[in-house]
C-alpha cells in the first residue's frame, strides 16, 4: 500500500478521480497475497463475525483461502514463539526512525532511499504481511515463492517483492490490533470507531496494548535483522506524540506533497486497494473518506508535534526529494544528527538513476474539488509552503 511517488507507465496514464469513472487497479493475480492472509484464526474469525459474514459470493474463494492461511498462521505463531520467544523478549529497540506523511505523499520513495543505509533495517513485505511465521519461514518464502508477488503494486507501477520495504501497520493488524486498514475488508459496512488513526481517541488500556503490539513486531524484526529500524506507515502520522513518548530516542521524518496530488492520488489508492483487498464490491466514491482521514490525521499530528523536541523531527517535501534526492537525504541526516551520510550516498544515487524515467500518474480535477481541498486543508498548504489560489 505504501504511499509514494506514483510511477506511471510510459504512456503517462491519466486517472479520473473527481467526477469521473473509478480508476482500475493494475493486474493483481488471484493467487497473490492479500493483507488478511497474515492473520491468525482468532483474528480472522473475529473480523468476519463483526461484519456479519457479509461476503460477496464472488469473494468466497478469497475468504476460503484466508481461513486456511489463518489456521496455518496460528500454528506457525506458536512454533515461532517456541523457537524465538526468549530472543524476542530480550531484543532491544534502539533509536528507531519513523517516516511519517499522508498516503501518497512519497513515504515509500523516502523509505526505499533511506534503506540504502545498510546500518539500518527496513521491515520488509514478508515480515509485515506474515508476522506470525517470518522468523521460521521468511527466507524460504522469499527464495522459492517470489512468483506469488505481482510485479507492480495495484495503485501504481512501483515494484513489489517479498524483500521490499513495507508498512509495519500491516503487521500490527495481522497480529490482532485495530487499524484504519480494517475498513478495506468490508468497505460497505460501518467503519470501525475508533480506528486508531488518532491514538488519543482510544481508551488508555487499548492504546497501550496497541503500542505493545507494535513494540513486539519491532523486536521480532530486530531478532532477524540485528539492526536498528527505519519504519514507515502513513497511519503513524497522527501518532507522533505517543510514539515519541514510547521511544524517547526515536527520530521522525515528515514528508509533505502538493495537496491536490495527495487528494487525487489517495482517492485512486482506496479505489484500487478495495478492488484488490475487499470481500465486497465497494460503493464508496472515497472523497469524504479522504477528507475526513486527512483532517483527523493532521489534527493529531499537529497536537503531537508540539510535544516533540524540534531536533527529533525533520520536515521535507516530496517535490524537493524528487528534484534532488541526495540534497534532501543530506538535510535529513544533518537535522537529525545522523552520521554516515557517505555510506548512504552511493545507494541513493543508484536508486535515483534507476528510477529517473518514472512518471507520475496524471489526475483530472474540477474547480469545485480544488476549492474544497483549499478550504478544508488550508493549514497543510500554509504549514508546508504550498500556494493557495487566492494568494
Image (tube, grey):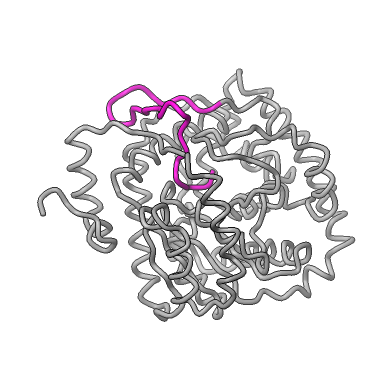
Residue 15, percent from left and from top: 37, 28
x 19%, y 54%: residue:
387
Image check: 68 left or right of 104?
Answer: right
Q: How many marks?
A: 0
- Work out whether 126 lies above or below 361: below
Q: Quadrant of residue 212?
A: bottom right
Residue 100, percent from left and from top: 46, 60
Examine the residues drawn in magenta and state their main secondary structure: loop
Quadrant where the image shows the C terminus: bottom left
Q: Which region of the structure is painted magenta?
A: 1-26
Q: Does 25 lie within the magenta span?
A: yes
x 72%, y 52%: residue:
131
Along the line of sight, which residue is nearer the eye, 142 or 243?
A: 142
Image check: 72 left or right of 272?
Answer: right
Along the line of sight, which residue is nearer the eye, 108 or 289?
A: 108
x 49%, y 60%: residue:
236
Q: Quadrant of residue 146?
A: top right
Image check: 302 left or right of 187?
Answer: left
Quadrant where the image shows the N terminus: top right
Residue 349, percent from left and from top: 54, 57
Residue lying at the far top in this picture: please name it: 58
x 80%, y 47%: residue:
74
Residue lying at the far left in this picture: please name it: 390
Q: Does 270 lie within the magenta span?
A: no
Residue 229, percent from left and from top: 64, 66
Along the line of sight, which residue is nearer the eye, 285 or 260?
A: 260
Amino acid at each position: 500500500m505504501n504511499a509514494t511517488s506514483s510511477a506511471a507507465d510510459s504512456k503517462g496514464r491519466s486517472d479520473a478521480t473527481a467526477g469521473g469513472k473509478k480508476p482500475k487497479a493494475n493486474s493483481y493475480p488471484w493467487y497473490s497475497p492479500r493483507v488478511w492472509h497474515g492473520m491468525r484464526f482468532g483474528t480472522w474469525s473475529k473480523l468476519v463475525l463483526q461484519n456479519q459474514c457479509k461476503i460477496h459470493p464472488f469473494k468466497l474463494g478469497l475468504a476460503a483461502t484466508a481461513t486456511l492461511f489463518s489456521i496455518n498462521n496460528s500454528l506457525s505463531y506458536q512454533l515461532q514463539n517456541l523457537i524465538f520467544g526468549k530472543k524476542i523478549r530480550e531484543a532491544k529497540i534502539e533509536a528507531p526512525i519513523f517516516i511519517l506523511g499522508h498516503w501518497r505523499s512519497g513515504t515509500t520513495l523516502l523509505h526505499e532511499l533511506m534503506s540504502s543505509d545498510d546500518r539500518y533495517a527496513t521491515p520488509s513485505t514478508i515480515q509485515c504481511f506474515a508476522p506470525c511465521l517470518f522468523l521460521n519461514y521468511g527466507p524460504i518464502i522469499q527464495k522459492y515463492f517470489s512468483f506469488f508477488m505481482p510485479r507492480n503494486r495495484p495503485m501504481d507501477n512501483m515494484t513489489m517483492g517479498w524483500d521490499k520495504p513495507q508498512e509495519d501497520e500491516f503487521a500490527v493488524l495481522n497480529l490482532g490490533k485495530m487499524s484504519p486498514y480494517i475498513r478495506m475488508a468490508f468497505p460497505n459496512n460501518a467503519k470501525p470507531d475508533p480506528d486508531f488513526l488518532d491514538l488519543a481517541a482510544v481508551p488508555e488500556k487499548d492504546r497501550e496494548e496497541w503500542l505493545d503490539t507494535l513494540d513486539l513486531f519491532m523486536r521480532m524484526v530486530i531478532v532477524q535483522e540485528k539492526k536498528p529500524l527505519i519504519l514507515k506507515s502513513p497511519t503513524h502520522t497522527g501518532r507522533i506524540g505517543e510514539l515519541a513518548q514510547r521511544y524517547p530516542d526515536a527520530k521522525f521524518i515528515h514528508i509533505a506533497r502538493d495537496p491536490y496530488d495527495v487528494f487525487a492520488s489517495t482517492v485512486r489508492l482506496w479505489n484500487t486497494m478495495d478492488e484488490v483487498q475487499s470481500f465486497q464490491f465497494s460503493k464508496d466514491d472515497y472523497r469524504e473518506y479522504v477528507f475526513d482521514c486527512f483532517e483527523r490525521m493532521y489534527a493529531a499530528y499537529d497536537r503531537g508535534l508540539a510535544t516533540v523536541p524540534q531536533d527529533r523531527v525533520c520536515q521535507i517535501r516530496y517535490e524537493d526529494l524528487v528534484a534532488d534526492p541526495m540534497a534532501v537525504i543530506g538535510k535529513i541526516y544533518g537535522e537529525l544528527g545522523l552520521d554516515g551520510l557517505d555510506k548512504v550516498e552511493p545507494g541513493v544515487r543508484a536508486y535515483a538513476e534507476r528510477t529517473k524515467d518514472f512518471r507520475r500518474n496524471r489526475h483530472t480535477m474540477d474547480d469545485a474539488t480544488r476549492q474544497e481541498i483549499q478550504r478544508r486543508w488550508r493549514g497543510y498548504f500554509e504549514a508546508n509552503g504550498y500556494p493557495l489560489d487566492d494568494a
